[in-house]
Amino acid sequence: MIRKIPAPRRIPPAAPGGTARRRARYALPAALASCVTLAIAACGGPPASSNGSTSSSSGVVNITWQTMWSGNTLTLLNQMVSAFEATHPDIHVTESSIPSATGDAKLLSEIAAGDPPDVFTEWNPVLGEYAADGSVQPFTPYLTGAYAGLEKWLYPIALQGGEYNGTLYALPMSMNSWALYYNKSMLKAAGISSPPATLAQLYADQAREWKFSGGKLQQIGFYPLSTGFEYFGSFFGAVNCFGSSGKYDFENCPGATNEANFFAQYSRYPYSSITAMEDAYGAVAGGDDDAFVAGKEGFVMDGPWEGAQNIPVTNQSMVGNFGVVPFPNTVGGPSTFGQGNYNIIPKGAAHPRQAFEFIAWLAGYHNQTFNSQIDPKGGWMPASPAIVQQPAYQAWLKANPWLNVFVQQMSSPYSVTPKLTKTESEFEAAEATATEAIAEHTKTPQQALAYIDQQANSGAGG
């Protein structure tokens, strides 16, 4: 499963091309890592450097692709590499998987040593920092000729997620989209006839679904505090809150205040019991399980991978027992938090032109038919609406109509991507800490917002 930054409890399934910057910011186990890497590497000649970037005597350019994925996603990466090489016989790709906990540190050390991979899949909140300090290469030299229309081809939120100061530095393989899942049988048992359309209805409905026995938590209604401030921002107009000086200013942002107060409503529920329950489920099924998948949670805000991948793989009894609606909000229309798995070309990459060609292909540019077939396998949103229109993707939507909510949100004018800044990682870490502080009653909502600003603006650049 997928994403970027400190991961919330439910990380989207690692999407080639999507969101979910964080463990996805998605989720997937690590068992297949070594065997898939060996299988991919075995397809071509030996590397000339530790990262394998070189040109062979036959004229084939060998490029390296470094990712932080594991498990089932690596099987899909293998398929993608094979398909690319079949249509690009002059380029060979060697993919390697590294632990996500040390992925960025390893990348920076490779850049410093002058031996980085040609392509790196980044889901952590460091793109702005890397662009600012020159650790990644801009794509401007390649956005000509056959690639002149690439930026307009993308969803606006997909483009925004890879831009720093108006220059494109990264392209997503896929994007994430977030909506409200509900358990049909739990809804019926609580005497509720239809899913909530407002935040007030959501709070009232979920309150009827909590169950405790002997002081032990048995069933959850809804608990946004285990997911985090960041992921709910688009529903409140609280994604990009900056003051006139360009600094983060969540303390004086009305949308952020509304979101913090929304979280405070749910702080009455036992944070430690909920996180223990979620951690217990997340430790099984390769991390694809959670309380909702297990049928023990009435509502959850999550992405398409939950219904398309996690539920059918982990708990067949939940298939057909869930529905999806846009998350109730205060902004006036359905929206999603823009996020994805972005590919970058590190400073010093040996073959940047071929790397960009591969990155654009992974995004689906001039490769829409294949992408429309591979994205459904992981439950991923594509980087472009053009892929959605392909027959294979349309067939997936027809077979699973609940997915339409996620697709529609990708083009919504209310959907927003966080602006890339030099201190984006500090900002997102602060959001996660502030959420926990509200849950544990160590900060008031307003104090939590002040903390976000203080931490996010403390680094160079603000």
Image (spheres, grey):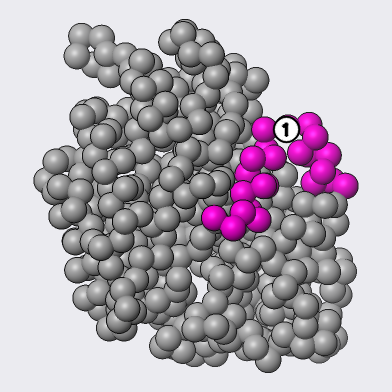
Q: Residue at x 63, y 22 (%)?
A: 319
Q: How many marks?
A: 1
Q: Residue at x 67, y 63 (%)?
A: 155
Drawn side of residue 328 relative to residue 343, left or right = left
Task: Give the percent coordinates (x, y) of residue 80.
Answer: 74, 59
Query: What is the crowding at mark 1: few (fewer than 14 residues within 10 Å), some, or many (at least 20)?
Result: few
Residue 407: say if magenta.
yes
Q: Residue at x 84, y 73 (%)?
A: 88
- Report if residue 3 is visible in the image: yes
Is 307 situated above or below 82? above
Quarter of the image with the C terminus in it: bottom left
Badge 1 marks a residue whose secondary structure is: helix
- Report if residue 46 is visible in the image: no
Is 127 situated above or below 235? below
Q: Residue at x 40, y 65 (%)?
A: 240
Q: Residue furthest front?
A: 332
Answer with the quarter of the image where residue 308 lies: top right
In front of the other: 56 or 274: 274
Magenta-highlighted residues: 391-414
In front of the other: 364 or 148: 148
The residue identified by callout 1 is 401
Task: Give the percent coordinates (x, y) of residue 166.
Answer: 55, 83
Drawn side of residue 51 relative to residue 235, left or right = right
Task: Give the percent coordinates (x, y) of residue 64.
Answer: 63, 75
Task: Give the percent coordinates (x, y) of residue 381.
Answer: 66, 51
Q: Residue furthest left?
A: 442
**Mainly helix, strand or loop, the magenta region?**
helix
Residue 298: say if magenta.
no
Drawn side of residue 406 relative to residue 395, left or right = left
